[in-house]
Amino acid sequence: MKKRSNRVWSIIKTILILFGSIFLLLCILAFTKIPFWQYYNLGTNNSKITKPPVTIILLSGNGIPSESGLLRAYFTAQLGNTYPGANIIISMPGDLTDSLGDPELTANELLMRGISKERISFENLGLNTRQQALKLSERKTQAQLSQPITLVTAPEHMKRAVSTFRKCGFTSVSGLPTFEYSLKTDLTFKDNDLKGNKYVPSIGNNLQVRYQFWTQLKLEVLVMREYFGLTYYKLRGWI
């Protein structure tokens, strides 16, 4: 019994050391720009727009209002106004008869930003990227599959989305990743000007500690999740 207990404790200790080492490595990487460049590469890999899109496809994120939903609507409208001849498909599950449903609320965001209602259509049956691509390809002839399309989705999702649509028969696929922009204002400050307890270290001039470290940690989670997604799609033969 004692030997078994020692063996179990040894296994637990090994697991704790392993996960602790991984966490420490992630914290160290968060002080570098490596997570950002991994994130950036996922968003720009093989997705550059080289031809005016015939169709712009907004791939669903979260609902409206949400950070991902509003960002995708904003970038889709920007692209749609740049290419006024392009049709726009909102690929998002939901009830099209519900005026407060996510597809209709997303369409309203596009209308508010200058996209005419006649240009907007919906694909509301796909529940993941693979199914969305399949549903949209079912509607297309071979000639239509060769027409340029541009996907609008989150940066970390772009590589998988473009690869999935190509696997489903679309031969001219590009993407517009919804990268966020940082404030251009200098956010440093003097801690003493704000008073308070002076025995706490000053961080007003240290943007790395205040913002960048935490942003890089967030990007690490997004990138790791997407790598798992890419691996799964690859194993299933979807990309």
Image: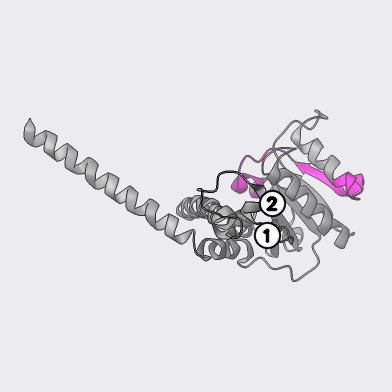
Q: Disc 2, disc 1: CB below 8 Å?
A: yes
Q: Is mark 1 on a helix, strand or loop?
A: loop
Residue identified by numbered label 2: 137
State the image coordinates of residue 144 (x, y, percent, origin top left).
76, 59
Q: Earlier in the sequence, mark 2 or mark 1?
A: 2
Residue range highlighted in magenta: 110-133
42 is higher (above) or lower (below) than 94: below
Which one is in front, 227 or 207? 207
Measure the C-alpha gap from mark 2 to mark 1: 7 Å
- The three-letter amino acid code for the residue at tag 2 is Ser
The one nearer the camera, 32 or 50, is 32
The image position of residue 168, as x and y in percent, is: 62, 55
Q: Mark 1 points at which residue?
A: 170
Quarter occupied by the C terminus: bottom right
* Residue at the image point whose x is 74% and y is 52% from the top: 57
The amino acid sitting under disc 1 is Phe
Give the residue at x 57% y 59%. Answer: 206
Q: Residues within 10 Å of mark 1 (few under 14, many from 20)?
A: many
